[in-house]
Amino acid sequence: MAIIEVNGLRKAYGGRPVVDGVSFAVDEGEIFGILGPNGAGKTTTVECVEGLRVPDAGTVRVAGLDPVADHERLTRILGAQLQESELQEKLTVREALELYSAFYPKPVDWRPLAERLGLTDRLTARFGKLSGGQKQRLFIALALVGNPRVVVLDELTTGLDPRARRDTWKLIEDVRASGVTVLLVTHFMEEAQHLCDRVAVVNAGRIVALDAPAALISRAAHSTVISFTPSRPLDDGELATLPAVASVERKDGRLVINGTNETVNAVLSLLARHGITAQELRVADATLDSVFLDLTEQEA
Ligand SMILES: Nc1ncnc2c1ncn2[C@@H]1O[C@H](COP(=O)(O)OP(=O)(O)OP(=O)(O)O)[C@@H](O)[C@H]1O
């Protein structure tokens, strides 16, 4: 059952539409991603879900609540990552966690949360003295401390090192396993691919694709990447004429061909005809990265 419902959402700034008829529904317990280039309208969309912005048109419901009219009730069930300016520099990590716990009727124990986010040895540090990654981790803790039914995370792991990013993904998966719905804005394709059940790709204020990451990838124009070092020189032009080849590039002496499964056999047959072997041959599925570029490149 849908817990977030967005229908025909529109928002313009100074007459310029930045969200231009966006509709989607997020099921309870789902991790739903919003992907898109800078300025696509992602933050504006989720801020309408959080009740921080008033839509010009369309409707938004979160657990049946209107985020603007029922804002007070919404804040009891929705957790959101703060913007940096919303926390006082002098507040310590412990004070922030205690303060935010006090806002909610049924908060979780913040200590294990702080532990999982690697904040335990920073509890007495003032917010203003934290590193970018520590601030980010504190914002994640504050979004979760109220034991929300829905959590909105905008740029969840921006600024985190690879280990902290992985740890945070695990935490979000555990949060979801407890039944929480997650609405996630991200620039990281790997993050969307790893975490999200479904992803809406947004470009210039509109949803241009909405599906499970694997389904988006399998529909991509070039869903397979073939790379190898040819044992002898080979004509790139001839490769480009093979079925379903989208591009042929050379990277560090290796040939990199974007195509489909069909392309793999065609490439190998061509090599065999020329008596060339494919050294260190790799065949990989395309990533959400290439899907994203396909879908958003027209208006980039
Ligand atoms: N309060 C505002 N007043 C005027 N323009 C705004 C306002 N907030 C956002 N915008 C503009 O609206 C557009 C969409 O912004 P939004 O932050 O929703 O995009 P985004 O997809 O989240 O981008 P990013 O990935 O860069 O964070 C941008 O061009 C932005 O400059």
Image (cartoon, helix red, strand yellow):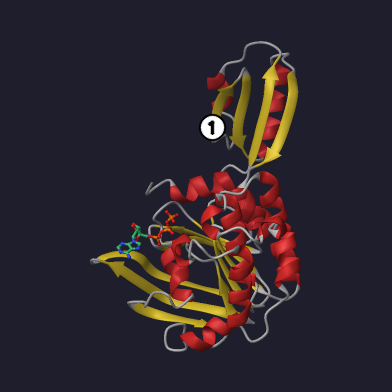
Q: Residue at x 72, y 54 (%)?
A: 167
Across and down, in percent, residue 136 comes to: 57, 57
Identity of the residue furthest to the top in this view: 232
Quadrant containing ligand 1: bottom left
Across and down, in percent, residue 152 comes to: 56, 69
Which one is in front, 251 or 129? 129
- Is the shortest distance between ligand 1 and the CB of mark 1 under 8 Å? no
Q: Which residue is mark 1?
A: 247
As drawn, 111 above or below 69: above
Instruction: Judge whether residue 182 can be spotted in this image.
Output: no
As drawn, 102 above or below 140: below
Q: Is residue 300 left or right of residue 26?
A: left
SS at mark 1 in the image: strand
Q: Quadrant of residue 290?
A: top right
Q: Is residue 70 left or right of residue 1?
A: left
Give the total number of marks visible in the rendering.
1
Q: Residue at x 62, y 55 (%)?
A: 192
Q: Quadrant of residue 2?
A: bottom right
As drawn, 252 above or below 288: above
Q: Is residue 197 left or right of residue 293?
A: right
Q: Residue at x 61, y 63 (%)?
A: 93
- Quarter of the picture holding the N terminus: bottom right
Instruction: Judge whether residue 130 can be spotted in this image.
Output: yes
Across and down, in percent, residue 43 comes to: 45, 63
Which one is in front, 279 or 161? 161
Q: Amino acid at mark 1?
A: Ser
Q: Quadrant of residue 150?
A: bottom right
Q: Residues within 10 Å of mark 1 (few under 14, many from 20)?
A: some
Across and down, in percent, residue 125 comes to: 61, 58
Identity of the residue furthest to the left in this view: 15
